[in-house]
Amino acid sequence: MDLKVIQELISMMENSRLSSMELEWKDMKIRMEKKDEDTLTLGGGRERTAEVKHYEAVTSSEAEVKKAEPAAEVKAPAVQGTAIKAPMVGTFYSAPSPDSEPFAAVGKKVSNGDVVCIIEAMKLMNEIESDCSGIIAEILVKDGDMVEYGQPLFTII
C-alpha cells in the first residue's frame, strides 16, 4: 500500500463522521480511531498522535515504520482577493486531459459554479467548482501537485 494512499485515508477519516476504521491489505493492518484529542490508533495497539504534516503507518509485523516527509509549505496568495481552496486532499489537475485546454487561466472570468480544476482522490476525478464570481488573478499550484485540504488553489478578484 502506497504511503500517499494511507495519507488520503487519514484525511478522509478526519473529514468524515466515522469514529473508527480498520483496514487489512496484504501484510499491513491499519486501525484508525478518532478520540477527543485527535489521537489515531494504528495497528499493533500503539497510539500515535496525528500531526498536520506527519503520519506513521505500522505493518502487522511491526518490522517497518514509514514516516511521511513534511509537505512543502503552503503558498499563500500574493494578490488580495478571494481564495478558492481545495475541498479535499489529492492531486491537482488544471485540465480534463493532458492535451486539453485548462479549465482556468490567469485573467479568465469565472462565475459561481464554473469548474476550475480537477482533484484526483482515491482514483476518483472530482471537478472543483468556483464558489464565487470574478477574474482569476493567480494560480497557486502546478499541474500534478499534491494539495492538502483547505490549501488555496486560485485567487479570484
Image (cartoon, rainbow, N blue to C red):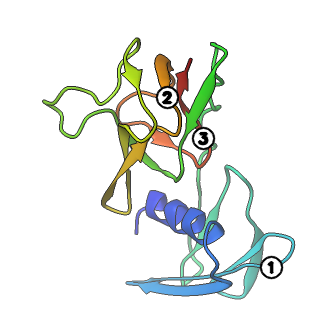
Q: Position of residue 108 (x, y in %)?
A: 37, 17
Is 135 drawn above or below residue 5 in the view shown?
A: above
Picture quadrant of residue 13: bottom right
113 with respect to 132 (left or right):
left
Task: Locate the N terminus by quadrant.
Answer: bottom left
Is 104 drawn above or below residue 131 in the view shown?
A: above
Q: Residue at x 46, y 17 (%)?
A: 135
Instruction: Report the mark closest to the observer, 2 or 1.
Output: 2
Marks 2 and 1, how far apart at CA = 39 Å
Q: Secondary structure at mark 2?
A: loop
Work out whether mark 1 precedes mark 3 in sequence or the reverse, and give the earlier one: 1
Q: Amino acid at mark 3?
A: Ala
Q: Residues within 10 Å of mark 1 (few under 14, many from 20)?
A: few
Q: Residue at x 73, y 78 (%)?
A: 34
69 with respect to 2 (left or right):
right
Q: Position of residue 83 (x, y in %)?
A: 60, 30
Q: Position of residue 44 (x, y in %)?
A: 66, 87
Q: Secondary structure at mark 3?
A: loop
Work out whether mark 3 precedes mark 2 in sequence or the reverse, and give the earlier one: 3
Q: Which numbered marker is on residue 71?
A: 3
- Name the residue carrying label 1: 35
- Name the residue carrying label 2: 133
Q: Position of residue 33 (x, y in %)?
A: 69, 82
Q: Amino acid at mark 1?
A: Lys
65 with respect to 93 (left or right):
right
Q: Residue at x 85, y 76 (%)?
A: 36
Task: Locate the C terminus by quadrant.
Answer: top right
Work out whether mark 2 precedes mark 1 in sequence or the reverse, and give the earlier one: 1
Q: Residues within 10 Å of mark 2 (few under 14, many from 20)?
A: some
35 with respect to 28 (left or right):
right
Q: Secondary structure at mark 1?
A: loop
Q: Residue at x 60, y 39 (%)?
A: 151
